[in-house]
Image (cartoon, grey):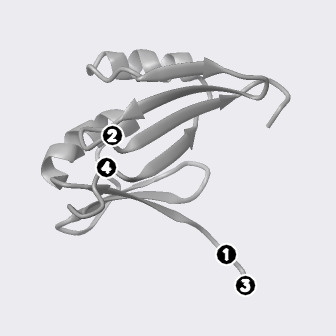
Amino acid sequence: MTISNALASIAVENLPESLVWYEYLFGRSADARPMQSAAEWKLPGGGWVHVASDADRAGASVLMLIVDDIAEELGRLDMHGIKPVSKAIGDFFKTAKLRDPDGNLIVLTQPQPGTY
């Protein structure tokens, strides 16, 4: 099997309400709206994040995003009222955990220098 890319999926109950939150998270509007019930963001390093209406699974998704500067991202998100529910610094990564309006877990992580 040859894998050429990946699409991470986040289930939300109400896509129109969640779009605002995810636009703040990604700092822009969705790159694609393949259907009325879904929005997608292309990541600079490859791959996509797919946010879709799915009331049965809403709140059970987990997404980890690797960022260059976690402090900068948290400062930007704080301007929109998005605050981490927890933060940690380990030997290999700094992390901040966020929850979207449905309770999905979004983890921002920044590798420590020389580890990733």
Answer above or below: position of 21 versus 13. Answer: above
How far apart, in angstroms, are the residues tagged by discs 4 and 2?
22 Å
- Spatial separation of the CA atoms under disc 3 and disc 2: 34 Å
- Residue 60's tag is none
Q: Are marks 3 and 4 in contact (CB under 8 Å)?
A: no
- Cα gap from disc 1 to disc 2, whole angstroms: 27 Å
Q: Secondary structure at mark 1?
A: loop
> In terms of image quadrants, where is residue 51?
bottom left
Quadrant where the N terminus sits is: bottom right
Q: Is residue 61 above or below residue 34?
A: above
Whether 89 is drawn above or below 116: the answer is above
Residue at which label 4 appears: 59
The amino acid type of the residue labelled 1 equals Ile
Label for residue 1? 3
Q: Residues within 10 Å of mark 2 (few under 14, many from 20)?
A: few
Number of the front mark, 3 or 4:
4
Q: Residue at x 36, y 20 (%)?
A: 83
Crowd around label 1: few <14 · some 14–19 · many ≥20 (10 Å): few
Q: Is residue 4 left or right of residue 44?
A: right
- Check disc 2 and report the residue beneath it: 28
Horizontal and vertical percent position of residue 64: 54, 44
Q: Is residue 45 or residue 100 the one in the foreground?
A: 100
